[in-house]
């Protein structure tokens, strides 16, 4: 005998878009009122939508918690899927618009600093020669921030270092970042032959906070060489502030080699790479996307251009 009892799958197909938006918002806020504001409806309307969802599915999706509410395991699972549906619908709208307009489109890419300069920037310049109508939004931040934005759907893809157990993201290794030391042109160390690691300790170092990957990598290398911790009168995660301090002092800054090379090749820039081999690279970075997502045509063009550059990098001049 064939059962006529509705399955969860068939019931889920009956949910309204407004209900999916609400349950996704509830997973990111602590109250029904905040969620209602986020999707542009009144709190009574949100309460009614939630009750209708639970009645339709025959499941408790939320429970009271003080003055707010929290989702049950079933509600949280549905909220995660609903959020992904919202992202996919937004991406679909962009892809349809791109298809209708030919080569136009908007790409939202994120990258940590080194790959942003060595790969994203030249790839954008190459892409826009062939597709000038494509608009590109670039976010340069830490891997943690980029992966958060990627999960939320505010980025198409990122060059970053995701967590090994991230269930929502997939990563394809692109390359590593050997470290170099940046100094101002005319720095005293540039006049010394055969500069070694110990010579660097005579100068102030500019590094990021202790929990940043580059700082941890440098400190581990110094410990491996049994060298003391360098003087760090300034600690900053700002790349621009680092360059400003380098320009006005004899401080040195360990940076990703592609970052230093991007300045060293231009004689008008006041920074060069010091001829010393740190003998270390930071953890390899990857091209990171959302699992199950498909890049829009414009985003795929940029991703392909970045991949081509990574596989055949142009030679850089360090002076």
Image (spheres, grey):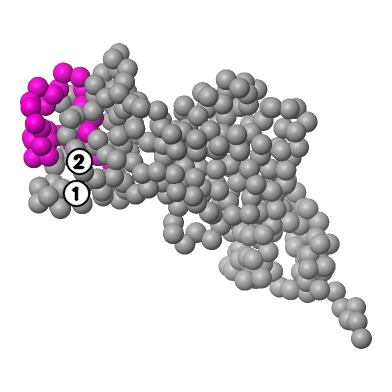
Residue 106 percent across, percent down from the top left = 63, 31
Residue 177 numbered mark, or none: none
Q: Earlier in the sequence, mark 1 or mark 2?
A: 1
| Mark seen at residue 221 | 1
Mark 1 lies on a secondary structure that is: helix
Q: Is residue 214 left or right of residue 110?
A: left
Bounds of the magenta segment: 181-209
Q: Is residue 109 left or right of residue 74?
A: left
- Kindly check if marks 1 and 2 are in contact, taking CB atoms under 8 A apart as contact: yes
Q: How many marks?
A: 2
Camera-side residue: 174 or 203?
174
Q: Is residue 290 magenta?
A: no
Q: Is residue 147 visible?
A: no
Is residue 308 visible in the rendered image? The answer is: yes
Q: Which residue appears at 58% of the width and 51% of the height? A: 290
* Residue topped by disc 2: 278
Residue at horizontal 70%, vertical 53%? Answer: 85
Judged left or right of residue 285, residue 92 is: right
Q: Is residue 236 above or below residue 14?
A: above
Q: Residue at x 11, y 26 (%)?
A: 189
Q: Position of residue 228 (x, y in %)?
A: 10, 47
In the image, residue 24 lies at what x, y percent? 66, 56
| Side of 167 where 93 appears, left or right | right
């Amino acid at each position: 005998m064939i059962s006529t009892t509705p399955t969860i799958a068939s019931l889920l197909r009956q949910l309204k878009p407004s209900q999916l938006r609400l349950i996704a918002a509830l997973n990111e806020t602590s109250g029904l009122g905040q969620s209602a504001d986020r999707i542009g409806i009144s709190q009574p309307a949100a309460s009614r939508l939630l009750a209708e969802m639970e009645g339709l599915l025959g499941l408790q999706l939320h429970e009271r918690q003080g003055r707010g509410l929290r989702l049950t395991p079933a509600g949280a699972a549905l909220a995660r899927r609903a959020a992904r549906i919202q992202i996919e619908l937004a991406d679909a709208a962009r892809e349809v618009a791109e298809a209708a307009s030919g080569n136009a489109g908007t790409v939202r890419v994120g990258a940590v600093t080194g790959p942003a300069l060595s790969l994203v920037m030249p790839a954008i310049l190459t892409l826009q020669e062939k597709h000038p109508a494509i608009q590109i939004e670039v976010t340069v931040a830490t891997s943690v921030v980029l992966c958060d934005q990627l999960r939320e759907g505010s980025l198409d893809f990122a060059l970053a270092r995701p967590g090994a157990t991230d269930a929502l993201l997939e990563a394809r290794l692109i390359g590593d970042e050997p470290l170099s030391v940046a100094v101002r042109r005319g720095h005293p160390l540039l006049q010394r032959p055969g500069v070694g690691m110990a010579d660097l300790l005579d100068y102030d170092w500019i590094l990021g906070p202790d929990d940043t990957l580059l700082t941890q990598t440098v400190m581990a290398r110094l410990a491996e060489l049994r060298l003391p911790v360098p003087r760090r009168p300034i600690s900053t995660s700002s790349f621009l502030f680092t360059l400003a301090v380098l320009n006005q002092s004899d401080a040195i800054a360990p940076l990703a080699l592609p970052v230093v090379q991007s300045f060293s090749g231009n004689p008008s820039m006041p920074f060069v790479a010091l001829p010393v081999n740190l003998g270390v690279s930071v953890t390899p970075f990857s091209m990171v996307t959302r699992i199950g997502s498909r890049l829009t045509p414009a985003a795929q063009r940029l991703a392909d251009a970045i991949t081509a550059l990574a596989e055949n990098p142009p030679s850089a001049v360090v002076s």
